[in-house]
Amino acid sequence: MKTGGFLIFTAFWLMMIGVSFYQQVAEDKQYGHKIAYKQAEMFFQHIVLMRQWNGQHGGVYVPVTEQNQPNPYLNVPNRDILTPDGMQLTLINPAYMTRQLAEMERNQSGIRFHITSLKPIRPENKADAWEVTALKAFEKGQDHFNELSAINGQPFYRYMAPLILEQDCLKCHGGDGGKVGDPRGGISVSIPAANIDNFLAERLENLKNSHLLIAATGLVALLFAYWAQSKLNKRLTKAKSHLQLAYLDALTLLPNRRYYDAFLRREWKRATRHHYPLSMIMIDIDFFKAYNDNLGHVEGDQCLRQVARTLRRYFRRSGDLIARYGGEEFCVVAACDSVQIMQLAEILRMAVETMKLPHPDSKVSQFVTISLGVATVIPKGAMECGDLLLHADQALYAAKHSGRNRVAKYQG
């Protein structure tokens, strides 16, 4: 894995974690809202159930205390009674019970519920703006109303549903002209958003920590993969380098005899299969032994490197090869015909001569020169690749014995 790929995978992984976190945060918030409204709905249903119990018993008598004063808005016979032992009792109807429960719940949990209507008898039951909207919606047939709204500047999850007149309710509300089944105001339940926010904050903190752990685990895995791949690449590069060294001549950095043998066999098979000509040039530096004897082996090695560098400039095609054959000899293999290989040989000869590398002991020039033997065959039948080498070597022999610094063609 390259550095660029690692960075792309890292960015993609972090983006995936971020998208997942964002989606789950949104889902958890929606879940929190649903919980709040469901809790408010359950409160409403519980209050209605208690009101029904109270109504079915015609109200409940309780001792008159500072907290349980007679209800001035309850106009029924026997609202207040005196027991034989002198205890004064007052009747608690569903509405009065609801108000008392609301005060207790608000003091304990901060949850508010409020019995109200568009035409309340008791002033404290007057609907606020949000409740008015809900009550008007009930008149149009809506069965409940919920919304996140503010009370005295504080956010609340508010839920409201209508109260339906039942048979027991007519004892108190029969004179209002209502009948069983009619909506008669409603009860709003308001749950402080802070209660749900604390619950959500804990869930979101756990969600954040789990995503950070997943992100970190993924990054560690990516780093390990990157490290392992880098280590493998280094080993492969080292192995490739060793392989290249096995096929390169250390002095001239040209392919060596081993690579030449493998290349020639491969190209020979291909030329045999497709019936095209294969050519070879054998090259020998003229009077190189004398050059070494006169200037020393260090200068001789430098001469070989310069000649190799000059020859290598003319080989760019994948089907051509220039290799060091051994000593001061070089070998060229090219997939071309006899005319083309002769032209290439002459170009190589002139390129070396143009170097004007001094050769004090040369008998043909004051500069280093080369002799070249050229051969071309179309592989077929019982011919072998060694035949091409033999023909090129015979041509080189002819070039050297006819004056050197020249190109000779196999004449077989």
Image: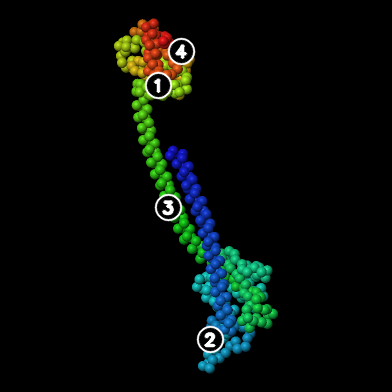
Q: 242 or 303: nearer the eye? A: 242
Foreground: disc 3 or disc 1 = 1
Q: Is residue 299 visible?
A: no
Q: Position of residue 249 (x, y in %)?
A: 35, 22
Residue ranking furthest to the right: 177
Q: Amino acid at mark 1?
A: Leu
Q: Quadrant of the N terminus?
A: top left
Foreground: disc 4 or disc 1 = 1
- Mark 4 or mark 2, earlier in chain: 2
- Mark 4 or mark 1, earlier in chain: 1
Task: Indicate how the structure is coloured in the image.
Answer: rainbow
Identify the residue shown where x is 42% and y is 16%: 280
Q: Amino acid at mark 4?
A: Met
**Mark 1 highlights which residue?**
264
Q: Position of residue 127 (x, y in %)?
A: 63, 72
**Mark 4 highlights which residue?**
342
Q: Quadrant of the C terminus?
A: top left
